[in-house]
Image (cartoon, helix red, strand yellow):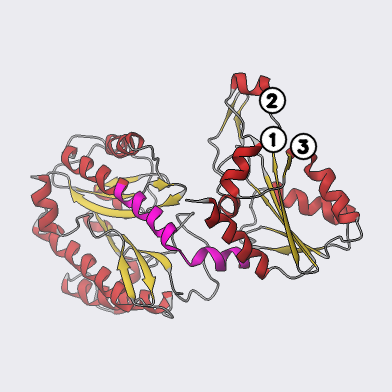
């Protein structure tokens, strides 16, 4: 992706800021895992969306004072000792080329510089920070630390949340973003085909995960979230990640997985027979789930409510479950289908979601109906990623096979 994409994102963000404000975005830092180990670094997705830089310990500041917009990027100073041990740090020239931000400053000076700004004659009345404000256990991160400092040192500054602005901007995907998601989907497709060719009874769930993630590594990618590979009875657990079970003959394995391309995620679910052949009962349930996906996509359009789409799926499942003689009343659907039909997808697997849950033009969604029949040890989920455009819904993953005939033909 070119620097112009990220520059344009900053322009759009600044347009939505109230005047006489500053906005601060941190790239983040890998948390400590143990005395001498850190968890893998994952860049703050809003910082990446606005800069195109995937590096630790950086700060972006956007200012809008009397209608004039300025911006600064704070990056760590070059440290030869650090580079001998851990790797080469980003240089100023590289940061400019990647982000198209001309003002590059020393990360060590950020708080001092920001304090001067908050005390100056052209100080902002408001400072935007980012918080999900949805989880009482949300980490005490750089954003909260900055807010705490400002409340103590500059109590007249109004602290605002940039959540609504970045949600609105990130929800509408450009062609560049969709291309990244499609690349991630291509990696997913190729890795899944390797999985299908190697799947057989007697292997362990973790070996299937290893097959998938090995193929991603060969392509310079990695999983977009913890790989779910649930065989048999484990498939009724939505987020099963233990992956310790030996796969039994006659069972199925539900795979929920994805890849990354330039931090954009794919999210796909497929359910395969371990021995390459569905039983008649498995096929009947599978086809009801597959039909539910068509029902959902038919109900999706710009302006559609996620709730209404999900209700259409539940209505379809009610008919199917009655045919399977599993329920008598539609209210019992929740026993076998207990999640929503999908979620926004983008830089996060569960991407930022609008409060009204109304589909907007150029949103990307997952569509993932499923049935989970605990008493039969059967869980089936089928998930694709779609782009909601003004001209209709486009399936971004049509080449990842999913009919029972195509799966059996490929595996045998």
Q: Which residue was labeled with disc 1?
A: 76
Residue 215: x percent and y percent? 30, 37
Q: Is residue 174 left or right of residue 86?
A: left
Residue 332 seen in the figure: no
Indicate the secondary structure of the residue bearing disc 3.
helix
Q: Is residue 166 rendered magenta in the image?
A: yes
Q: Are marks 3 and 1 in contact (CB under 8 Å)?
A: yes
Q: Quadrant of residue 98?
A: top right
In the image, residue 125 lies in the stretch drawn in magenta: no
**Mark 1, other Cα within 10 Å: few <14 / some 14–19 / many ≥20:** some
**Would you name the residue on which mark 2 appears?**
79
For the residues labelled 2 and 1, the Cα–Cα distance comes to 8 Å
Considering the numbered disc 1 on the image, is that residue within a helix, a strand or a loop? loop
Q: Which residue is mark 3?
A: 108
- The CA span between labels 2 and 3 is 12 Å
- State whether residue 47 appears in this view: yes
Picture residue at 65% right of the left edge, 58% below the top: 131
């Amino acid at each position: 992706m070119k620097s112009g994409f990220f520059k344009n994102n900053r322009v759009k963000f600044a347009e939505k800021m109230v005047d006489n404000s500053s906005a601060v975005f941190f790239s983040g830092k890998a948390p400590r895992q143990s005395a001498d180990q850190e968890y893998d670094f994952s860049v703050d997705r809003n910082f990446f969306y606005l800069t195109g830089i995937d590096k630790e310990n950086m700060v972006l500041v956007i200012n809008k004072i009397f209608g004039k917009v300025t911006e600064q990027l704070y990056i760590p100073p070059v440290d030869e000792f650090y580079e001998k041990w851990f790797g080469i740090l980003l240089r100023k020239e590289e940061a400019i080329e990647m982000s198209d931000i001309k003002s590059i400053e020393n990360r060590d000076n950020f708080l001092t510089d920001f304090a001067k700004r908050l005390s100056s004659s052209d100080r902002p009345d408001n400072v935007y920070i980012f918080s999900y404000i949805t989880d009482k256990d949300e980490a005490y991160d750089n954003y909260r630390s900055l807010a705490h400092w400002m409340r103590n040192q500059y109590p007249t500054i109004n602290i605002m949340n940039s959540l609504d602005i970045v949600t609105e901007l990130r929800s509408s995907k450009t062609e560049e973003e969709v291309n990244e998601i499609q690349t991630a989907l291509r990696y997913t497709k190729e890795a899944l085909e390797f999985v299908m060719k190697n799947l057989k009874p007697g292997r362990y769930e973790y070996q299937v995960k290893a097959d998938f993630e090995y193929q991603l590594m060969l392509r310079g990618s990695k999983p977009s979230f913890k790989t779910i590979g649930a065989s048999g009875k484990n498939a009724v657990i939505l987020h099963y990640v233990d992956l310790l079970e030996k796969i039994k003959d006659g069972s199925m394995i539900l795979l929920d997985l994805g890849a990354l391309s330039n931090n954009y995620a794919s999210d796909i679910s497929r359910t395969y027979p371990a021995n390459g052949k569905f039983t008649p009962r498995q096929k009947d349930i599978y086809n009801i789930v597959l039909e539910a996906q068509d029902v959902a996509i038919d109900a999706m359009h710009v302006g559609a409510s996620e709730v209404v789409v999900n209700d259409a799926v539940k209505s379809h499942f009610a008919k199917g479950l009655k045919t399977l003689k599993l329920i008598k009343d539609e209210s019992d659907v929740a026993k076998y289908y207990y999640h929503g039909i999908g979620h926004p997808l983008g830089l996060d697997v569960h991407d930022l979601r609008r409060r009204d849950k109304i589909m907007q033009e150029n949103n990307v969604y997952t569509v993932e109906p499923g049935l989970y029949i605990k008493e039969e040890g059967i869980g089936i989920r089928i998930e694709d990623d779609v782009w909601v455009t003004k001209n209709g819904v486009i399936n971004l993953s049509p080449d990842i096979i999913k009919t029972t005939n195509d799966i059996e033909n490929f595996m045998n």
